[in-house]
Image (cartoon, rainbow, N blue to C red):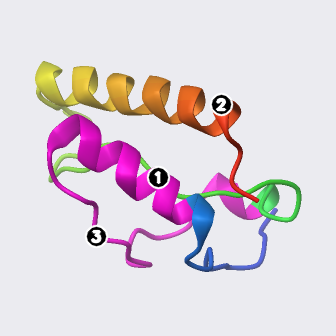
Amino acid sequence: MSGPSFVTVPGKFTQLVSDTIAGIIGQAPFFSTTGGTSDARFIKDYCPVVELGLVGGTMHKTDECVALSEIAALTDIYAALLIAYFKKPPA
């Protein structure tokens, strides 16, 4: 099954994501549509979505690997993003 491609329009939600990421890693993210397809295409009509995760040269390969520090940082980002979102949902 496939779904239509999409772009999340910049606004309060994307700003919340950017601010949260910058607060954790000290650098704002670069928003791009070069990441390929995402399961988010199936829920984009029901809630705000962004593609946010780990990247690397071994992604989706047999010997996929990533630094543990990157997993820890991503975990911190997800937790902070959920707290910030539910504390004050972007309208």
In the depicted structure, whether residue 45 falls above or below residue 89: below
Q: Nearer the viewer, mark 1 or mark 3?
A: 1
Q: Which residue is found at the position 59% from the left and 73% from the top?
A: 11
Q: Which residue is found at the position 27% from the left and 41% from the top?
A: 23
Q: Which mark is residue 40?
A: none
Quarter-of-image position of residue 84: top right
Q: Which residue is found at the position 50% from the left and 53% from the top?
A: 16
Residue 16 placement, left or right of 76: right
* Nearest to N terminus: mark 3 or mark 2: 3
Mark 2 vs mark 1, CA separation in Å: 14 Å
**Is residue 5 visible to the viewer in this orientation of the structure?**
yes
In the depicted structure, whether residue 82 falls above or below residue 5: above
> Residue 19: percent from the left, percent from the top?
37, 52
Q: Which mark is residue 30?
A: 3
Mark 1 vs mark 3, CA separation in Å: 11 Å
**Is residue 59 visible to the viewer in this orientation of the structure?**
no
The residue stretch that appears in magenta: 14-41
Q: Which mark is residue 87?
A: 2
> Residue 41: percent from the left, percent from the top?
72, 64
* Nearest to N terminus: mark 2 or mark 1: 1
Which residue bears the numbered disc 1? 17
